[in-house]
Amino acid sequence: MYKFVECIDAGSEYCPCHLAEKGECIICSQLQNKVFCDCLYWKGTCIYEELLKNGNKAKKTRQYKKCDIIAIEKIRDDLLIYDIRVSNSLLRELDNIGAYVFLKSPNFPDYFGTPISIMDINYEQQSIKLLIKIHGIKTKDIKDCNEKIMVKGPYWNGIQGQRFLRNLKDKSVLILGRGVAAAPGVLVTRRLTLNNNKIIALLDKGRSDKNICTDYYTKYGAEVNNLSIINYKDKTLTDDFKKYIKDILEKENIDVVLAAGDDEFNSLIINYIHVRRTDICFASVNNSIMCCGEGICGSCIVKLSGKEIRSCKQQYNPLEYYYVEDGK
Amino acid sequence: MMNVVVIGGGWAGCAAAIQAKKCGADVLLIERTDMLLGLGNVGGIMRNNGRYTAAEELIALGADDLFNIIDRCTRHKSIEFPGHKHADLYDVTIIEAHVRRYILDMGIRVLFETRVVDVDVEDKKIKAVFLDSGTRIDGDVFIETTGSTGPMGNCIRYGKGCSMCILRCPAYGPRISISQRAGVEDILGMRDDGVFGAMSGSCKLDKDSLSKEIRDELNTKGVYITDVPQEDINPEKLKMKVCQQYALKEFAEKIILLDTGHAKLMTSYYPLEKLRKLKGFENVRFIDPYAGGKANSIRYLSMAPRNDTMKVIGLDNLYVGGEKSGLFVGHTEAIVTGTLAGYNAVRSLMGLNGIELPVSLCTGDIIKYENETKRKKDGLKKRYTFAGSEYFERMKKLNLYTTDKEIINKKVEALMIKDIFKQKLI
């Protein structure tokens, strides 16, 4: 199978990063202690040259900035939508597929930072909208923020398999989402409908009593259906879902499927669809645990074909990641 | 379906694709940029010294296609400049379109602006190549003619950085060594000082930026020669040069311009301020590389080990031509090696052994000689070209050099290989 070699930060203002400085660049062979070019992923700039021109030093990394909280919408005790005002430049940078930021309260050290995907962008209000599930120390720390919050960004690797979504035009994309994990799909819908792509979203409300994201998907022109997709008791796909997929694969010419759930969900639906239609490409939300977002701490590392992938900034092929031999 | 995939559309790749097509194969040519011919778009010199013999040998062998096009695009016939006799200069500003039309008219499929980044290898056989989009392209036999020049990182490490040459790596992405991806380690050429790689040997000036007097002389005679000011003579620069046939003392002490449509300046690079001090050069500017005042591209960084049928050693179905196949300099050399690679690639599809060209022809001798000499001490510091330096001396010594077409024809006929490259194999 074709191996992805792709760093989401390559060619950005944050490249070369500390990995390059230490001879661990994800892309550049010259910066992996080799002495020849073997550039498998070209984004228009030579990382080796950029590092030399920068005095063999990494570019400045992203920094936390104190931002105003405009509004907090309480869906449930443990489910909140934050509206946060950010600078115009950060806003523009976050208006991209897979965008996320690190959030933390102003009172605690950097290791309290936790990655949260951007659900929506509001240029008039100059704000980002994030759906946050409170379930641990870091998110409880965020819940305590009412006026000010620390924001670090932009990061872009919240969606894996971005090459299948990038430059898509006049195509059909099926988004299968569940609960909070469906939030990054809203931004995907926003970007893709700009290029005349048809978005069909099938959303499972998860443990909530309603689908929080439905209105946002609809706002950007997605055709939304609400359905129970997965039985968590026995980890199987529901009959309703199977029937729906059969119909939609017959009726629509689906090019890409975005799996926007937890790992079990993503694995089940990707394998189910792949055995029926091998020509469909897959993107997925990135469920890795992340602490630094810069490829340093190693908490986001996943192993694929014996290779370590720093999934906070490195792309992989979701089909390869979730693939199981028997296809289920 | 017999399927030949050629990776890299320079002179060698074009020659290989044409030859494979003539043999009856279904041919796909994959080119990284929007133009064929690669560095041939800024070359232009044909038939100088021993290249004349080589060109006529190939024509007698039946590989006349590209030479016919080149002859049609020639601006100056049989000119002389220091160390070089009976050179033809083709017009680099029109040649690509002519070759491109010919290739497309033959029914060769060409993918432009498409970069190959990886291979699928099984049991020493390449099954498919992958494009940077992830698309898989299956093939029965592959020919790699991706050259050995650049990309940017190599031009930085072994040279003075990217000088924005015709290869346009920043725009289309860097060259990838397919053989190395398939597990066969590349061989690197060296300079006199032991540093890897060598710098391209000429650059192009915008002819319109030169004085009318120089322009007129170039347009009528094809050559313009003037002295380098005493204080600017730098023989050290010759050592860096790829083209040992042009690394003569005269090329350090003289400014030599050739009319190839642009004004070809026979030195790797030349600081613009110094160049403009010369009479008639007051307004001069570079056209290739765009930063020709600073540096030039670095070459010979990516050669695959091969046998004399042009098959890569260590892989069953990968053939090579041009600079990828050795320390060859020039278009004629690329066309010779590319043609043989194309021919033998199709033979291997038919289950036939590859042929070697006879050493009684310079085209056969150079392929064998380069392969042997490259392995000896200092062999990686040498360059191999019909046009000069050590190999041209060898041609003269072995009586391989002649400009008599009759002699060449008779020789080829006596070897029973007249028009061998015109045979359909499939």
Image: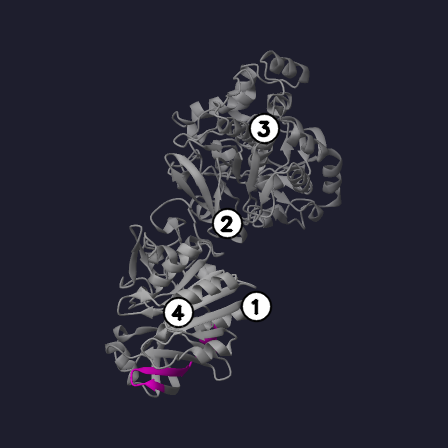
In this image, A172 relative to A113: left or right?
right
Residue A86 lies within the magenta run: yes
Residues in magenta, as a range: A74-93
Q: Where is A96 relative to B236, above or below?
A: below
Between tags 4 and 2, which lies in front? 4
**Where does residue B259 sit, x and y in percent of width and height?**
69, 38
* Dot 1 crowding, Cα within 10 Å, few <14, some 14–19, many 20+: few
Residue B23, numbered label:
3
Quarter-wise, where is residue A59 in the image?
A: bottom left
In this image, A203 relative to B109: left or right?
left
Q: CA distance from mark 2 to mark 3?
A: 39 Å
In the picture of the structure, the residue carrying the numbered disc 4 is: A240
Q: CA distance from mark 4 to mark 3?
A: 57 Å
Residue B162, numbered label:
2
Residue A196, numbered label:
1
Q: Which chain does tag 4 point to?
A: A
Q: CA distance from mark 4 to mark 1?
A: 29 Å
Q: How has the structure been colored for display?
A: one colour
Q: Where is A132 relative to A72, above or below?
A: above
